[in-house]
Image (cartoon, rainbow, N blue to C red):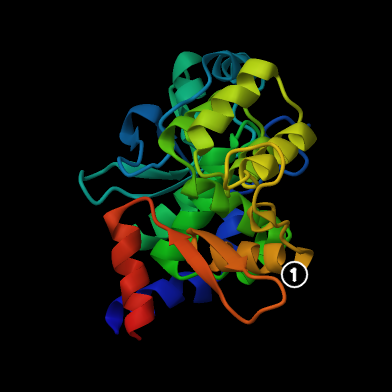
Amino acid sequence: MSSKKTQNRGLGRGLSALMADVNEPGEKSDGNASRQPDMMVPITRVHPNPEQPRRHFDAESLADLSRSIAEKGIIQPLIVRQSPRQQDAYEIVAGERRWRAAQMAQLHDIPVILRDFNDTEVLEVAIIENIQRTDLNPVEEATGYSQLMTKFGHTQEKLAEVLGKSRSHIANAVRLLNLPDEVLVYLREGRLSSGHARALITSQDPAALAREVIRRSLSVRETEKLAKSEGEPSRTGSKSGGSRSGSVVKDADTIALEEDLSANLTMSVSIDHQQGQETGHMTIRYTSLDQLDRLIGMLSV
C-alpha cells in the first residue's frame, strides 16, 4: 500500500513538473531561455548520483560542451539536492554531463537550482533526463520507458502525453526489450535500426536472422519479408505439394492484437489462429525469470 502510494506520488507531484526541471532550453542557446540559479557552489562540493542510469558519456560531445562552457560559462543551472551521504555537499539530480564538462573546463564554481527530492524522485528524474538525450540509442530509450512504467507505475498513455510521443511509439520501443541480448547489442551499436529490430520480434531465432540481415545489408522491408517467410515453411520440407496450413499469413487485426498484448505485457506475444475456425493458440515468450514471475502473478489475479 505504501509503495504504491509512493509510486503514485511521483506521478502526482507531476511528471510534467519533473520534466520542467529536466528540460534544458539553454545548453546551446543565447541564454535568453536559461533559468536563474539559486546559488553558485564550488564544483568540489557537487557529486554525481551513484544511481544514475546513464553510464556512458560521449567523449567528443563532452569536449565540445567543455569548450563552450569555458567560453560562455554554464548557461543552464544543474538541478541538485542536499547530499544524503555527505554533509555540506550536493548530489546531482539533473545535469551530470554539464558537471563533467565544467570539470574539464576547470571551473571552480557552478550554478545550481536546489530541489527537495527524495530517492524515488531522484531516480525518476534521472531516467527522464536520460530519455531526453539527443544521442539516445533505441535500447536506452526502451529501457527508460520500461523503468518509468515498472518502477513508478506510469502508463503508456501518460508517458506519451507528457513526453510528447505517440502511445504506439512507446509500445513499439518497449517491445524491443523482448529481443535476445545479441540483437540488443546490434541495436546499441547502430548495426540495426529500430525498424529492423521490430521485424525480428516474432522470429523463431531473432539472433540468427539479425546476423543475416547485417551480412546482407537488408532494408527494413526486406527484413520484414525475410521474417515472414521464416514463419511459412512447408511442413513436408518440399517446395511443392506440402501442407497448405504451413503458409498462413496473419491478418492485420491479429498482428495489431499481438502488438497491443506485447506492449502491455512487455513480453513477446504470438497468436496463431486457425483460419475459418474458432481455435488456435497464443504463445507468450519471456526472457527472464522475473518476467515469468510477473506473468504468473497477472494470471493468478
Classify the position of the C terminus by image quarter: bottom left
Is residue 77 at all visible to an observer of this figure? no
- 215 in relation to 203, above or below: above
Is residue 140 at all visible to an observer of this figure? yes
Task: Looking at the picture, tell me which residue is in the foreground, 185 or 5.
Answer: 185
Measured as percent of width and height from the top left, residue 70 is found at: 59, 16
- 234 in relation to 292, above or below: above
Task: Looking at the picture, tell me which residue is in the foreground, 87 or 117.
Answer: 117
* Location of mark 1 (residue): 253
Measured as percent of width and height from the top left, residue 79 is found at: 49, 47
Identify the residue shown where x is 32% and y is 76%: 297
Mark 1, other Cα within 10 Å: few <14 / some 14–19 / many ≥20: few
Q: Is residue 88 left or right of residue 62?
A: left
Identify the residue shown where x is 76% and y is 28%: 219
Measured as percent of width and height from the top left, residue 236 is found at: 57, 44
Q: Element type at marker 1?
A: helix
Amino acid bearing label 1: Asp
Classify the position of the N terminus by image quarter: bottom left
Q: How many marks?
A: 1
The part of the image, by quadrant, that contains residue 195 is: top right
In the image, farthest residue toward the front: 241
The part of the image, by quadrant, that contains residue 155 is: bottom right
- 228 in relation to 252, above or below: above
Identify the residue shown where x is 64% and y is 48%: 23
- 192 in relation to 121, above or below: above
Identify the residue shown where x is 60% and y is 24%: 212
Q: Is residue 175 left or right of residue 213?
A: left
Measured as percent of width and height from the top left, residue 199 is found at: 66, 43
Task: Looking at the picture, tell me which residue is in the foreground, 1 or 69.
Answer: 1
